[in-house]
Amino acid sequence: MKLLHRLNPGAATLAERPVTAAPAALAKLTGDRATIAKGQPVGWSPDLARVLSLKRKNPAFTHRALSLVMMEGTLRAPSGTRCICESLRKRCPTSLLPVQRLALSEAARTGGGLFPIGVGHGKTLIDLLLPLVMPECKVAVLLLPSNLRAQLIDVDWHYYGGHWRLPNLAGGRWFRPGLPVLHVITYEKFSTQEGTDLLTRIRPDLIICDEAHKLKDRKSARTGRFLRYLELNPETRLVAQSGTLATRTVKDYAHLAEYALRDGSPLPLKHHVVEEWAAALDPGHTVAPPGELLKLVDPYQQLAPLEGENEAERERRRVRDAYRRWRNATPGVVATDESAVGMPLVIRTRDPGKVPDELLAHIQTALGGQRPDGEEFVDELQRVVCARQLASGFFHRWRYPAIQGTPQDPELILRWFSRRQEFNRELRERLKRPAEHLDSPGLLVRAAIRAHQSPPYDGDLPTWRAHSWPAWGEIHKRVVHVTEAVWLSDFIVNDAAKWALRKGQPGIVWVEFPELGERIAKAAGVPFYGGGPEASATVIRESGKRSIVASLRAHGTGKNLTMFSRMLFVNPPADGAAWEQAIGRCHRQGQLADEVEVELYQHTDELVGAFQRARDFARFIEETEGTPQKLNLAAYGCAAPQP
C-alpha cells in the first residue's frame, strides 16, 4: 500500500479527507432559492456556483500510464496461485480493463468514487480490489443484491483470486496479515430488523455499493439506515457504482454523489436545488426550462438535430449532454461511454394470437378500479399490477381458508380489514420520521408492543405509542389469509411454452410473477428459477442446451448467462434500467452467438405503454449517463414469426 501511495501522491488518506458533512460547507453561502415555482427555469444558486467551480480532470495527465502499470503490478497474485479458469470455461482475467484501472486509481486518489460503469465492464473485480488500493483501509463492506452473493463467494472470488491479490473475506477460511477485511452484505439483509445497526457493529473504513441504484429511494428503511450511518461517521469512504445510477431521475443518486465526493459532488447538495435540476433534466411531459443550467453547455459543442425534434426538445438534449460531460469530468467520477459489446441486438414483438374477449373485458374493469372478483382497488398501483396479471391470463386475490374445518367468521374478517387499514395509516405516517430501531414496519410493531405492554417496558429500545395498536393487536392474529392465483386463460402460458420448446433454439423466458413462471415451466417441461440462494447458485451452471424460465426480479441483474442468446419477456417492465440489466445477462462480453435476439409481448395497451415508457427512460439514461443503452442501440424487427 505504501508503494501504491507513492504512485498516487495525491491520494486521499483518512487524515486528509474532509470529514465535515458536505452540506455544512455551504452553510455560509447565501442566495439559494428557498422555494421553487413549478415550471420556472432553473435559477442561480451557490450549489450551481460550486459545481461550476469544480476542477475538471484530464485522465491522460492525472493517471500516467506508468503509474497505472505499476499499480496493476502491485495487485497481481503471487506466481503459483491456483487458476480455476479452465474448469469454469472462462478466459483468464490476466490484465485489468482500462476502465478498471481508471476506477481503482481515481478512488485511491480522491478517497471515494461515483462510478456509472455500464453492464459488462468488470465492476466485480473493481469491487474486490478497491479495499487494497484505498489508503489505510482495514475494514471494508461490500453491499450487493442477494442474488449475486452466491456467485461472488462461490465463483468470482476463486476465479479472480487465481490472478489477483484479494482482501481477507470475513468468515472465510484464510486470513493474511496486513490485508484489509471485506464483509460481503446483501441489501436485503441490510433491510431486515437485524440490519438496523449492522454498519455500526462493523464500523468499516470503506463502503462499496455495487448496483448502487438499490439505494436510490431515500424514504426506504434500507437507504435511511445507510445515510444515517454516513452522516454520523463522515470519515467513512464511499464508492457507489452501477450501470444505471439514474433509472428515472437524477434524484436517484444525488445523495450517493454527496457522500462519495462531498463538496466535490457534481450534483447539488441542497435538496430543493436537486429538485430544481431534476425538473429540467428528468424525462416527462411537464418539465422546467434549463435556465441557468445552460452555463454547463459548451457553445462550441453542437448536436445534430433529430427527426421530428422541436427546438425545446433539442435544447433539453443539449443540456443533458452538457450535464453528462461535466459530471464525467469531475474528479472521483469514472464512467463508460461505449457499449461493452459490439454484437448485434435485435428486438421483436411476439404475437401470442387472439386475446380472449373475457380477458380484455376484465382488464378494462381492473383499470377502472375493480378486480374481476369485485374487490375495489385503493390506489393506482393495484390497478396496474392487476392489469399486467390479466394480460397473462390470471389475477391475485386473498382467500380465507377454513381453520381446522371451521369457516372463518365474515364479520370478524370485516373488522380485521378495518382495523388493519387504520393501523397501516398510522404506520405510514410514523415511517415518514425514521430513526434507529424505528425505520421499518416490523421494528415499529415491536416498538408499539413495548409501548403498550404490561408491566411497562423497562429497557433501552425505543417505544412507539400507536393509538391504533391496541385494537389491531387484539385482532391481527385471529384472521388467516393466503394469496392465490386465479387462472382465467392459458393462452400466454401455452405460447411461451411453445417459444421455449423451439427446436435447436433454447432461451430464457423472463417473468415477473412466480406463479406464471412455474406454470410456463411445467407446460414446457423446463426448470423455473425463482428467488433464493439455491436458484441463484444453480442458474449460472446451466449449459444453454435447454430453455429455462426465470424470475426477472431474482436473476435479471448481475449474473452472466451468456450460454443463452435468446430471451422472451412475458411481462415487459416499464423501467429502462431493468431492460438494460436483463438484456445484459446475455448481451455482454463472452457471448459467442452472432447476435442476441429479444422478443416481448405487446398484446394489450398497458404492455405497449410500459415498453414505450421504458424506451423514454432509456433515452434519458443514455443522455445523462453517457453509456449506450441496449434499448437504443437495438435493431427493431417485425413481429416474430410463430415457430
Image (spheres, rainbow, N blue to C red):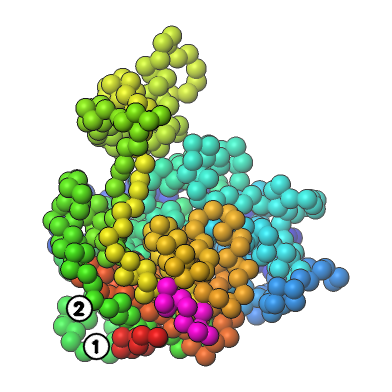
- Tell me if 75 is positioned left or right of 402 in this view: right
> Which residue in the protein does label 2 denote?
313
Type of the residue with mark 2 = Glu
Label 1 sits on a secondary structure element that is: loop
Q: Residue at x 55, y 73 (%)?
A: 561
Q: Is residue 559 above or below residue 64?
A: above
Type of the residue with mark 1 = Leu
Q: Residue furthest right?
A: 80
Q: Are marks 1 and 2 in contact (CB under 8 Å)?
A: yes
Q: Residue at x 21, y 64 (%)?
A: 359
Residue 81 numbered mark, or none: none
Q: Position of residue 273 (x, y in %)?
A: 27, 56
Viewer-closest of 634 and 88: 88
Quarter containing the C terminus: bottom left
Q: Residue furthest front?
A: 405
- Tell me if 17 is positioned left or right of 179 in this view: left
Residue 247 visible within the image: yes
> Which residue in the protein does label 1 denote?
306
Q: Residue at x 82, y 68 (%)?
A: 81
Q: Earlier in the sequence, mark 1 or mark 2?
A: 1
Residue 76 visible within the image: no
Instruction: Decide whether residue 498 is among the magenta residues.
Output: yes
Label 2 sits on a secondary structure element that is: helix
Viewer-closest of 252 and 324: 252
- Tell me if 118 is positioned left or right of 492 in this view: right
Instruction: Decide whether residue 99 is among the magenta residues.
Output: no
Dominant secondary structure of the residues highlighted in magenta in the image: loop
Magenta segment: 497-506
Mark 1 to mark 2: distance in Å? 10 Å
